[in-house]
Image (spheres, helix red, strand yellow):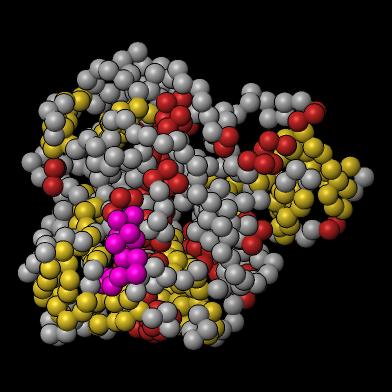
Amino acid sequence: MGGCFSKPKPVELKIEVVLPEKERGKEELSASGKGSPRAYQGNGTARHFHTEERLPAPHPYPGAQDCVEAAICHVKDLENGQMREVELGWGKVLLVKDNGEFHALGHKCPHYGAPLVKGVLSRGRVRCPWHGACFNIGTGDLEDFPGLDSLHKFQVKIEKEKVYVRASKQALQLQRRTKVMAKCISPSAGHSSSTNVLIVGAGAAGLVCAETLRQEGFSDRIVLCTLDRHLPYDRPKLSKSLDAQPEQLALRPKEFFRAYGIEVLTEAQVVTVDVRNKKVVFKDGFKLEYSKLLLAPGSSPKMLSCKGKEVENVFTIRTPEDANRVVRLARGRNAVVVGAGFLGMEVAAYLTEKAHSVSVVELEETPFRRFLGERVGRALMKMFENNRVKFYMQTEVSELRAQEGKLKEVVLKSSKVVRADVCVVGIGAVPATGFLRQSSINLDSRGFIPVNKMMQTNVPGVFAAGDAVTFPLAWRNNRKVNIPHWQMAHAQGRVAAQNMLAQEAEISTVPYLWTAMFGKSLRYAGYGEGFDDVIIQGDLEELKFVAFYTKGDEVIAVASMNYDPIVSKVAEVLASGRAIRKREVETGDMSWLTGKGS
């Protein structure tokens, strides 16, 4: 299954330029249908597609009038390992020269539209500079996440030392390719009380599992159930863009689910799982039998337990409705955010332009301290202070005071009183696995579901993925970890699907995540838990830096701002199975990254 799951090969990284630049590429919000009845019946009859979801034509080059062909360069114009963006009149393509061969692919990452020419070419794939998705240069197929779609692959021919590319105009305009998928041919779809595959949770893990099954030719019934009232959506965007509407956040339009027979039950809460009889019971009493089960319930936000916790206008951000209400209430008013982790800081940043005042309350002495360390945390804190955010550090909330039932003040343990019309709580989350306590599925002491590298639980035929699992992290000596991030959930959903089909896939992806505040992105790859030193190159003050997190003699994670594509480069080195030593990053000589060094 693609390079993502293949054995490590010796790493060879080639990068053209590292030009940090204002990479505020317009994060493309995928369009989607409105409305959300309780169940989308997968009877396979609907054939309405949004433009980006056209079913692939049987032949990629339908007719000459739909194609464009042009000579785009001389064979000697590109060195091995070089990439170039070229214009074909109807759109651009990414031209890649690797091992003497030319490949032409879509030039934009289908996830958020990043220019792939600024990414990293290594081991037969190109890795996105922004969020780390990987595409096979031979096929255009997506091999590591985030995102759902692959790239178009275009025909290349060489004549008289010239390189010609031939492409369909439609493919050039779409810039994304949904893999060919099976349809559901089960006669019972949509109405019987048994399903072949049941997926609990419709986040990235659940959706990718369903899509992978269809891509692999599985044509039996798939039911995806979610507590949410919406079809699967881009949850990381909620805290970065609180105004976003559900239809802008949708990962796929509802026609997509209908066409491929992926049934979605919304506002559907599973209360018990009976593994002996392979049956789940929903809160409304509905029972559904399954033969394979994926548990991807995600997590529930922790609440404040202080006095006054029941007052109005105190929120955790879990749904588009939560996010939208917070923005409405914060406009021109006083907002308090409790917790200076990713969610809290993204919300605080977003509200600075809307609210009269924004205050952040945090137990640690700097934001992100456990994750990014003291120095990086302090530099980010300064950026927030320059944007009028007030910090109350090393304290917590002791009381929420109301006036006529609505929040008026937040009282801190330091006895400070902060004016507040709306409060957002971002103090972490716990796995949403309460419904499994009575089942024979193992949970650890914190409520996580332990799985092996194949995403299997202790019960045969029951798999788990996403924020609620602990799994062995291959490149950290199979240490059992929980990584509650978007990219990891995608990867685990895929591995679970492959193993439902007995393909014996193992999870091997390098964790990759990002955060965005005040139009600036911070990218992060690796697993930094337990780091004992941070080595910083570049300029922290200017927020143009790379930070290497080390433990003993090894680099275990990297973070950067305005330094692309360094995080994607490091992710590629780690994905190849090569360890990075502390001494390699201490000197400031980055030649080891480009394959020229040791």
Could you tell me residue 62's position as x and y percent? 72, 26
Q: How many marks?
A: 0
Could you tell me residue 241's position as x and y percent? 41, 59
Hey, which residue is sitting farthest right in the picture?
A: 160
Q: Look at 45% across and 66% down and name the residue there.
A: 516
Image quadrant holding the C terminus, namely bottom right
Q: Look at 50% across and 45% down and name the residue there.
A: 30
Could you tell me residue 434's position as x and y percent? 13, 47
Hey, which residue is sitting farthest top in the picture?
A: 187
The answer to whether residue 329 shows anywhere in this view is yes
The answer to whether residue 99 shows anywhere in this view is no
Q: Does residue 478 sit above or below 34 in this rendering?
A: below
Does residue 153 appear to the left or right of 530 in the view shown?
A: right
Q: Nearer the viewer, residue 256 or 402?
A: 402
Read off the magenta span: 323-338
> Quarter of the image holding residue 339?
bottom left
Q: Look at 39% across and 18% down and name the residue there.
A: 43
> Quarter of the image holding residue 192?
top left
Does residue 281 appear to the left or right of 30 in the view shown?
A: left
Could you tell me residue 529's position as x and y percent? 31, 70
Q: Look at 42% across and 65% down and name the residue there.
A: 515
